Structure formats: structure tokens, C-alpha cells
Image: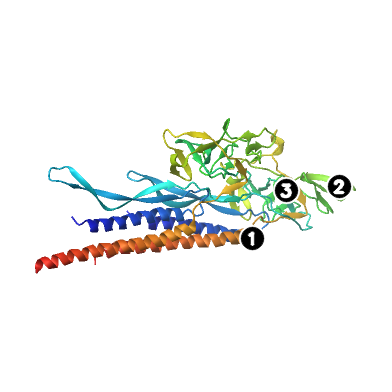
Amino acid sequence: MDLSMTAASSALHAAQQALEINAQNLANVHTPAYRPQASYFESAFSAQWDGDGGATQSLPWGVDLQPGSISTEAGPMKASNNPLSGALSDPNDYFVVQTPQGTRYTRNGDFHLDADGNVLDGQGNAVMGETGALRSAPGVNAQFTGQGQFQMDGAQPLPVKLAHIAPADILRQGSQLYDAAPGAAVGEGQGKLVPQQVEGSSVDVFKGMADLVALMRWAESAQKAARAADDAATTVIQAAKL
Amino acid sequence: MFRALEIAASGMAGQQFAMDTVANNLANVSTPGFKSQSAQFEEMVTQDSVNGMVGQGSRVSGSESDLSQGAIQSTGQPLDLAIQGNGYFPLVDPSGKEVYTRSGSFHLDAEGRIVHSSGLLLGGGISVPQGTTTLQIGTDGTVAGTVPGNLVPVTLGKVEVVGFANPQGLLAQGQSIFTSTDSSGPALRQENSALPLGLGTVNQGSLEGSNVNMIDQMVSMISTQRAYETGAKVISAADEMLGYANGLRR
């Protein structure tokens, strides 16, 4: 079996997968509170068998791409005129929202009121306070205060519920919502809510474009390696004909 | 399946929508009562049995209005009204349905009714008699005028200001007119509410300017353009990579 050909084609395949992850990050440069995904490569191994069916050794035969961790860097904060917007100072703090699938976590703090005065996120999920879902009376203005609390005009301010989850325990759910991994420790928020700010995407366009160039070169070398392996095989076949 | 092309294309489609939004804002930089809008992006992922959650690009989840107060510009016209606060003027459309606006450019018609610049009547059925000399509108909307035969001004009616639980949910109809929806909730009036609604005051002789910030829009235009270009670069990279795969077989 020609290992060098397999290795080269696995490299080309991994480069394509890495490009998909990079494309996903670059397509979300303007998505508020988007956290990019890294990718990492593992060398893949194939086993050699001895005559009795037992594995004797493993030989590297290429690379395998794995989706990597979600970035722990917070995006830049941008001022917003929405009184119900807030950004989180601690990069591992999250707002808590109630979705039809259960409790989810988000850093996209661009909220609004519905016709009944409920505070909702962009997908229509209820935003939680320490004492239940945040709510205002219909038509009565509400905002996040400098103390990071939810304040409806003429009422007592209410603390907004924040959760703290380690980066390794975060599961991407789409629409900038995350779930905590089963068994993960979900603690109290450690930072504060900065009112009338929205967190931007933490995608680094410079890194994305540099990765794009590197991936293209890598795919090119993989193709060259495959051709070299092919050339070598041709030479062997030619030699056999002599 | 190689998805990089579709992912990049989804991002570019979103940037195109954002550019349309910026263009609309810039075109309305001097429209009275206009509220600046922005496209809202969200990430898309799907569950894949092999790789878990995989990216599908981004999409525009909607556009959000910046509901902050526009600058009050003095015009000196007695029937130019600006709202300082969160309220809207109710208008009556030809079918009798109530519609809403923040553009307070009104005039009198031949029958003495107060008409909006779009041609719709102001709600409340105020009638100004022929020959009325001065027309005064108080901050609470009370209309008073000096009518023939009376030395002291008489109260003619009240300009109403209404609010909404979710003004983001109002549906734009053009000509700065909005209709209420299930999402915005029905129009709310202060007299029916025990709690302060913050609907604001009426300022006679002035108009609320557009709250579009020219500089912000220019910056947004540049960053949208660049993000679009990034998408185009990813598409050409994906194309090149497919070329390498094709090139394996000479």
C-alpha cells in the first residue's frame, strides 16, 4: 500500500476542512459576540499487522483535522443606543436565556421588549434575572443600569443572572447560543454587565486571511507530494518493464 | 461535501443586506423623524452526525432600529411638531385605521383639519375654525387658538402621543408611517396606564431630525465593503483548493 499517496491526500482533505472552519469564522466578522472556532491537526496512524493478525507497530500515514476549541477571547465592545443592551466584562461570563430546548447561554446582550413587556434576545428567548425572567410592564421603559441591573421605570432594579462557564465546557448551538457540557460546573458570573454596549465578533480578520494563504500553500504542497509519489510509482512500474 | 463556498456566500449575502441598510440610512439623513437601522447577523450551524456542530455561515436575523432621540430642529412653522420622548403621533388612514409617525410635519386643510405631510389626518379630530389667528400647542399637546369673536384663546383639542411596548416591532409603511403589529403590541395611552410610559412632550415649531449618524454610516460602509471582499477571497481560495484536488489526476 502506498503510504505517501494516502498521506498526501489526507493532507489535502484536512486543508479543505480547515478552510471550511476558516470560512465560517470569516463569514461571521460582523456577528455580535461570535466566538471563532480554532482547528487543530492530529497525525493519523495506521497499524501494521504481523502474520498472526496482531498489530506490531503504528506508522504515521497523514493528518487528521479536528475542530478545535472555541476562542476564549471576548470581542470588542461597541456603544449601543439600545437601553436594553449590555456587554460582559469577564470573557467567560454569559447571559442566561430560556429556550424551548432548555437553558442556554449567550454573550450577545442586545435585548428588546416584546408586546407583553418580556425581555427577549434576538431569537425571542426570555432573558433571565436572578429572580426569574426579566419583565417590564407593557410600554414602560426599561434599561440596564451602570450597576449592571435591570431597571424598569418606577420599580426596584433587579439583578441580571450571569453564568460563568469554563471555555472547555462550552458547546456551540448556533445563533451565538451555547450549552454547557453535561456535568460541567456552571458558576455565578464573575465580572460585571457593562450597560449600553454590545460585544462585537472576536474574529481576527488578519489571522483569518493569513491562515487562508497558509492553507492554500499547504494544499499546494500536498498536491505536489501526491504527484511526487505518483512519479515514484511510475518509475517503479517503468523499471519493472525493462 | 466541501462547504467553504456556501459558507462564504452566506456571509457575502449578509454583507449585501447590510450595505442596503447603510444606503437607506444615508438616503434618509435629512428625513424628519427617521430612525437609523442596522442589520443584525447571527451564526448558523447544523448538527452533523460525524463532526458534531458544523458551521453553515452567517445570516441576517433582522434589522434593528436605533430608537434614540433625533435632534430637535426649529422651523418656526406653528404646525411642525417634534416629540421629545418615546411616543408617536397617531394618524388616521383612509380606511379609518390608526397608523403612527414621528415625523411631525403637519398643515391645515381647507376644512380646518390637521393633516400630516403624507396626506393622512391627525388622530383626535381637531378642527381649527376659519380665521383663527394664533395657534398654540402646549408641551402636553393641548391645541389652543384665538378664534374670531373671542379675545382669549380657546382650547380646540389635544394632539395625542401614543407609545408601544415594543417599538422595534412596528411595521414601516413608507412616508415615515408605521402600523402596529402583534410584535409591537397595540398603541398605549398614558391616561390608560398607572405607570409612566415616558411618551414625551410635544415641541411646537420644530421637527425631530433624522438620528442617522453620517460618520458611523461611512465607517459601517467601509467595514461592510471589506467583509464582503473577505468573503470573495474565501470563495476564490475554495475554488483554488478544488483545483488542487482536480490537479491530483494529471
Mark 3 or 1 closer to N-term? 3
Residue behind mark 2: B153
- Element under disc 1: helix
| B136 displayed left or right of A8 | right
The three-letter code of the residue at mark 2 reads Pro
Image quarter of the C terminus of chain A: bottom left
In-front residue for pair A231/B139:
A231
Residue behind mark 3: B84
Looking at the picture, does residue A7 appear above or below residue B188?
A: below
Residue behind mark 1: B214
In-front residue for pair A171/B64:
A171
Mark 3 or 2 closer to N-term? 3
Residue B61 image point, x, y percent: 50, 49
The three-letter code of the residue at mark 3 reads Gln
Q: Kindly indicate the quadrant of the structure image that contains residue A12.
A: bottom left
CA gap, disc 3 to disc 1? 22 Å
